[in-house]
Image: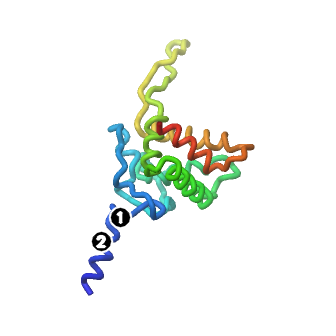
Amino acid sequence: MSDVILEDVALTTPSDIRVFGKWSGAEVQISDMSLVDYILGAKQPKYLPHSAGRYQVKRFRKAMCPIVERLVCSLMFHGRNNGKKLLAVRIVRHTFEIIHLLTGENPLQVLVNAIINSGPREDSTRIGRAGTVRRQAVDVSPLRRVNQALYLLCTGARDSAFKSVKTIAECLADELINAAK
């Protein structure tokens, strides 16, 4: 009897939990040290990227949100897509299957590489003094890099799928694969 209970406990360890029941986040390697805390949600692995968590309540809490769920939430922009999270989850599931078929790699690794490559490292800000305004180059924080990368990837996929024969899952897979190279 105790063996059965121990086996059930062993199945729920974080290394056994896989996104959509297929892909594990345990073997994902992050090459950029500054983004380690913001990309991988290995501290809170989930089967589905739908936690209904309130990450906006406290500042910087969205950094604890798993990256796949943040991708799903960033697909829900523009008024006609608001609130359709299950549709966005289905799009990401099909995207991951397409990525796995085309590359043979773990789609989570492709997503992480795409975020690392597409996030801006430097930006410019306005500095005004005595009526004159000039632009000053500044470094971008890691959380903003992840936010901008997700926004740019989803916007590119949405624009390429608009009035196209390809589905948004195919376009998002193409965006992620090309950005990960």
Give me the residue at 41% from left, 27% from top: 139
Instruction: Classify 33 as above or below 7.
Output: above
Q: Nearer the viewer, residue 127 or 73?
A: 73
Q: Is residue 45 left or right of residue 7?
A: right
Q: Nearer the viewer, residue 130 or 26?
A: 26
Quadrant of the drawing holding the N terminus: bottom left
Instruction: Classify 173 as above or below 128.
Output: below
Tell me the element at label 1.
loop
Give me the residue at 38% from left, 54% from top: 25
Residue 70's spot in the image, x, y percent? 50, 50
What residue is disc 1 on?
16
What residue is disc 2 on?
10
Alpha carbon separation for disc pair 2 and 1: 8 Å
Tell me the element at label 2.
helix
Residue 133 shows up from this direction? yes
Residue 67 shows up from this direction? no
Residue 92's spot in the image, x, y percent? 55, 54
Label number found at residue 158: none
Q: Nearer the viewer, residue 164 or 51?
A: 164
Seen as rendered, the residue at the extreme bottom is 1
Label 2–label 1 contact, CB within 8 A: yes
Q: Is residue 162 left or right of residue 21?
A: right
Check disc 2 and give the amino acid type: Ala
Give me the residue at 61% from left, 48% from top: 170
Mark 2 or mark 1, earlier in chain = 2
Check disc 1 and give the amino acid type: Asp
